Image (cartoon, helix red, strand yellow):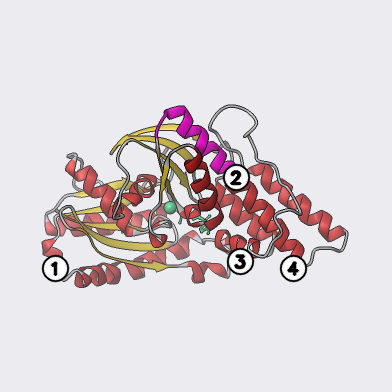
Amino acid sequence: MRVLGIETSCDETGVALYDTDRGLLADALHSQVAMHADYGGVVPELASRDHTRRLLPLIDQVLSGAQLERTQLDAIAYTAGPGLVGALMVGASTAHGMARALGIPVLGVHHMEGHLLAPMLEDEPPAFPFVALLVSGGHTQLVQVDGIGCYQLLGESVDDAAGEAFDKAAKMLDLDYPGGPRVAALAEGGDPGRFRFPRPMTDRPGLDFSFSGLKTHTLTAIRQLEQAGQLDDQARADVARAFEEAVADTLAIKCRRALKQTGLTRLVVAGGVSANVRLRAKLEEATRKQGARAYYPRGRFCTDNGAMIAYAGAQRLIAGEKDTVGQMKAVPRWP
Ligand code: KG4
Ligand code: ZN
């Protein structure tokens, strides 16, 4: 079965073609990052318009990359939520329109299920069951995954998501959007010993997270340096490093705790923040200590992409799910 995947939930237009026998055949992505950078964040209306402009040419590009015609598709999967409603509607209406014209099934996928299953596209995919750490701009969750669709939430952030905290810290440090990779780059030259930020909620039992306090801590550190006339480039790098160390440590501590609690030995890490190199190093150490192994998607499938949606959609279709004809789904908030 050849499944076209469409991702338009936020600021990346992603398209991919997944074959249930042969694996991933082609994928393409257009990032709107440069367009939104002038505004310091994603402007929803601009995002929807750009998806409208980019989506059909990207679909053609993927089909020609795989040397296939539209009529050779067996199904279409699209991100139905959560995300920006206008952006979601572009993907949903395109998917439903195409599927209706071609007379094939269409299926709305949960964006986070896409992230969760992205490591399954790698050469050595993890076997079920596993623990998944989902760390993106909108979510920070620990999930026990027993199989496709069998997900048990073990813990989540009670306030900001880890990616959101990175983006906010970036703004405080006068770095451009998107902040995560920029904070990481600045932290490279930082001294890990100069400041120590708290590891929130690690001193009590449980698997929930809280990152809003770290944000306040970062702001206070910056203000104090500023008032003392010490906020030079090195000090900014040191603050970035302390922030990154604290987020990465906190996530690693909770992952190890989740592995211990569940008795599982596989940890899947996905979502935009899983691209963070320091986080990966800490997770490698935490899993090794626990006698476990960590699995990640390849770099370009850590952030939003069409391949994860094509894969998740294919699995759901195999399980017999599909949308009702004419009822496209665009669900901005979807637990
Ligand atoms: O999964 P994603 O592409 O979109 C959402 O579904 O949210 O994640 C985007 C988030 C942003 O907050 C971005 O700053 C963060 O992932 N991110 C990073 C890195 N790369 C992306 N955070 C820290 N270090 C990185 N290298
Ligand atoms: Zn995402």
Question: Which region of the structure is painted magenta?
Answer: 250-264
Q: Which residue is mark 4?
A: 233
Q: Position of residue 53 (x, y in %)?
A: 35, 70
Instruction: Provide the secondary structure element on which disc 2 rests.
Output: helix
Q: Which residue is mark 3?
A: 176
**Mark on residue 249?**
2
Instruction: Provide the secondary structure element on which disc 3 rests.
Output: loop
Q: Pick whichever, 97 or 56, lies toward us.
A: 56
Labels 4 and 1: the sequence-earlier one: 1
Q: Is residue 254 visible?
A: yes
Q: CA distance from mark 2 to mark 1?
A: 48 Å
Q: CA distance from mark 4 to mark 1?
A: 53 Å
Q: Pick whichever, 216 or 128, lies toward us.
A: 128
Amino acid at pointer 4: Asp
Q: Nearer the viewer, mark 3 or mark 2?
A: 2
Task: Report the residue at 27% width, 59% height from top.
Answer: 94
Amino acid at pointer 3: Asp
- Name above or below for residue 272 compared with residue 315: below
Q: CA distance from mark 3 to mark 1?
A: 40 Å
Q: CA distance from mark 3 to mark 4?
A: 16 Å
